[in-house]
Image: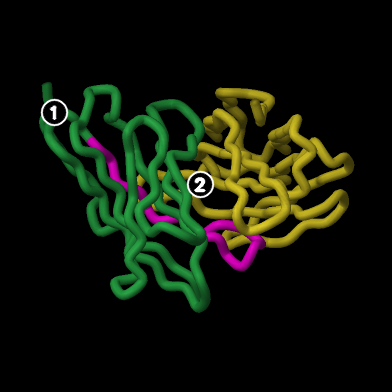
Amino acid sequence: DVKVTQSSRYLVKRTGEKVFLECVQDMDHENMFWYRQDPGLGLRLIYFSYDVKMKEKGDIPEGYSVSREKKERFSLILESASTNQTSMYLCASKAQGRSYEQYFGPGTRLTVT
Amino acid sequence: AQSVTQPDIHITVSEGASLELRCNYSYGATPYLFWYVQSPGQGLQLLLKYFSGDTLVQGIKGFEAEFKRSQSSFNLRKPSVHWSDAAEYFCAVDNYGQNFVFGPGTRLSVLP
């Protein structure tokens, strides 16, 4: 079974803190994604990566950065957390090719106070 | 730009009743389409996908979906809903192999 794990299920941080969200997949997938999910807005893509050290901006990259130093790991970084970044963050991975589905982790619920 | 709409934000059905969740997409080429389900507090799980062949596709948990190119639709159906189907459902289209575009989701409530 494909497994996508996220470092924390729940996280509480203070405004201005630097926050790291880690995602690891065990299926040697080329593509990895970070989304945030908010009620009524569905899933919005923050960043994605199609190879090690490669990254592409999604729809809402402002206030976020990412790192992919190894194929299995994709990190989301909030350089200076703000209250409007309180959200559910979902990581996903996918094999290369259009017919393959994305596999999701369980999510990290981040609260910034 | 590619887009996916799910016209129903929230649907309530009685247990045992049939279900249809609507999905419409806008895409410039042959679409690769997916339906996911998200149970409370969980990540998303794939129900089914379509990219070619028979326009009626079967998925897990007794779900099926029908692709209708003329209507740009990919509606999800289930003949008899179970209480455990209460969840949020997302339709998605592959974006030229780069990423997915997701719809806003439909929340399903099931009455006993």
Q: Are there few (<14), some (14-19), or many (20+) residues within 10 Å of tag 2?
A: few
The residue under the point 49% across, 71% down is B2
Mark 1 vs mark 2: in front: 1
Instruction: Classify mark 2: helix, strand or loop.
Output: helix
Q: Position of residue A5 (x, y in %)?
A: 66, 27
Q: Does the magenta-highlighted stretch encompass residue B96? A: yes
Q: Which residues are magenta?
A: B93-108
Depth check, front residue: A76 or B12: B12
The residue under the point 22% across, 25% down is B82
Display coloring: by chain
Count of numbered circles in the view: 2
- Colour of chain B in the rendered structure image: green
Type of amino acid at the residue the image marks with label 2: Asn
Q: Are there few (<14), some (14-19), or many (20+) residues within 10 Å of tag 1?
A: some
Depth check, front residue: A51 or A34: A51
The residue under the point 40% across, 63% down is B4
Magenta stretch: dominant SS? strand
Residue identified by numbered label 2: A84
- Colour of chain A in the rendered structure image: yellow
Q: Say if A82 sits above or below A4 in the image.
A: below
Q: Position of residue A104 (x, y in %)?
A: 58, 37
Q: Does the magenta-highlighted stretch encompass residue B94? A: yes
User: What whole-number distance in Å separates the C-alpha atoms at marks 1 and 2?
Assistant: 41 Å
Q: Which mark is residue B16?
A: 1
Q: Is residue A45 left or right of residue B61?
A: right
Q: Position of residue B64 (x, y in %)?
A: 33, 44
Q: Say if B56 sits above or below A109 in the image.
A: below
Residue A90 location, quadrant: top right
Depth check, front residue: A65 or B79: B79
Q: Position of residue A59 (x, y in %)?
A: 57, 62
